[in-house]
Image (spheres, grey):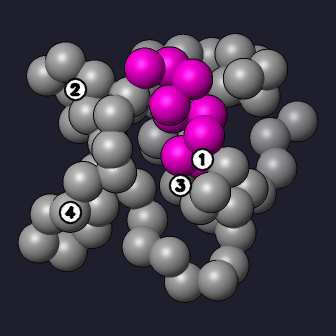
């Protein structure tokens, strides 16, 4: 089951998938792997909710289980 996670944990999981960053853009930071760019939420002290995590997982192109196993 997918649960909310902190921004720090999201960044660690993306780095395990060889994403580089985070880099600064105009509004949000992003991480990059080749030509793929994933925007990550701004730090706001709250966990990243399930709907946003699902969108990020879909953009990455892996299953929820693969994401949780990272």
Q: Kindly identify which residue carries mark 4.
A: 24
Residue at 57% in and 23% down:
16
Q: Estimate how packed mark 1 is, as few (under 14), some (14 to 19) or many (20 or more) residues with alpha carbons within 10 Å.
A: many
Local SS, label 1: helix
Can residue 66 be seen?
yes
Outermost residue, right side: 1
Image quadrant in which you'd find residue 5: bottom right
Residue 8, position as x, y percentages in the image: 62, 57
Q: Which is closer to the viewer, label 3 or label 4?
A: 4
Q: Mark 3 points at which residue?
A: 52
Place residue 48 in its image quadrant: bottom right
The answer for how far apart the CA atoms under marks 2 and 4 are is 15 Å
Give residue 36's mark.
Answer: 2
Q: Residue 40 sits in which quadrant?
A: bottom left
Which residues fall within the magenta stretch? 10-18
How many discs appear? 4
Residue occupied by mark 1: 10
Q: Which of marks 3 and 1 is in front?
A: 1
Seen in the picture, residue 49 relative to 70 is either above or below; the reply is below
The quadrant of the image that shows the C terminus is top right
- Say which label, 2 or 1, has the lower sequence index: 1
Q: Which residue is drawn at 61% across and 34% down?
A: 13
Which element carries disc 4, helix, strand or loop? strand
Which type of secondary structure does the marked residue at label 2 adopt?
Answer: strand
Between disc 3 and disc 1, whose residue precedes? Answer: 1
Element at badge 3?
helix
Drawn side of residue 19 relative to residue 58, left or right: left
Q: Residues within 10 Å of mark 4 (few under 14, many from 20)?
A: few
Q: Does the magenta stretch include residue 2?
A: no
Label 3, residues with CA under 10 Å away: few <14, some 14-19, many ≥20:
few
């Amino acid at each position: 089951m997918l649960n909310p996670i902190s921004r720090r944990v999201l960044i660690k999981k993306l780095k395990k998938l060889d994403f580089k960053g985070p880099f600064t853009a105009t509004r949000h930071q992003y991480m990059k792997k080749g030509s793929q760019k994933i925007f990550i939420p701004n730090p706001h002290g709250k966990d990243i909710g399930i709907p946003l995590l699902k969108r990020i997982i879909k953009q990455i192109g892996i299953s929820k289980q693969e994401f949780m196993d990272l």
